[in-house]
Amino acid sequence: MASRAQRTLKSRRESSLLIGGFVLLGGLAMYSLPYFIVKGKQGQNTLAKEGPLSKTEVRRGAFLNSGSKDIGPDPDWSFVTNSYQGRRSAYPERPNQSEA
């Protein structure tokens, strides 16, 4: 009888390890999915779009830009360098403390 109980305990332990292994592999697969999606899109410019915006994009833009009235691509954004070429600088100048 002791051997039957040991076999049952051993099979439960093995099945628990098997299930845990499958859960671990599934978790690793889900965790690595964004990495493989980004690698698949590498080299493609997903921001640039030729042609006018669709009605859905115009409607979404109003919510994302919190009521912005300018519709269309930003003329100050460079898709080649992936940087903003407009008025703002990365480090705006601070006013002199002696003048204030």
Image (cartoon, rainbow, N blue to C red):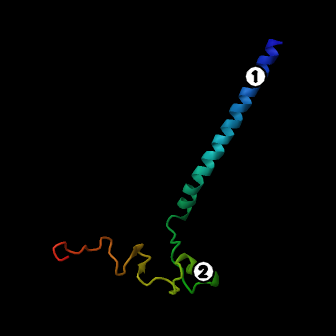
User: Residue 74 vs residue 86: left or right?
Assistant: right
Q: Position of residue 8 (x, y in %)?
A: 79, 22
Residue sitting nearer the eye, 9 or 42: 9
Q: Which residue is mark 1?
A: 9
Circles 1 and 2, Cβ within 8 Å, touching? The answer is no
**In the structure shown, which secondary structural element does the residue marked by tag 2 occupy?**
helix
Q: Which residue is mark 2?
A: 57
Q: Residue furthest right?
A: 1
At label 2, the amino acid type is: Glu
Q: Residue at x 74, y 31 (%)?
A: 15
| Corner quadrant of residue 58 | bottom right
At label 1, the amino acid type is: Leu
**In the structure shown, which secondary structural element does the residue marked by tag 1 occupy?**
helix
Q: Residues within 10 Å of mark 1 (few under 14, many from 20)?
A: few
| Corner quadrant of residue 4 | top right
Q: Quadrant of the N terminus?
A: top right
Q: Residues within 10 Å of mark 2 (few under 14, many from 20)?
A: few
What label does residue 52 carry, if any?
A: none
Q: Position of residue 27 (x, y in %)?
A: 63, 46
The residues bearing labels 1 and 2 have C-alpha atoms spaced at a distance of 59 Å
Q: Residue furthest left?
A: 98
Q: Residue furthest top?
A: 2
Q: Position of residue 56 (x, y in %)?
A: 64, 81
Q: Residue at x 44, y 76 (%)?
A: 79
Q: Residue at x 53, y 59 (%)?
A: 39
Residue sitting nearer the eye, 90 or 78: 90
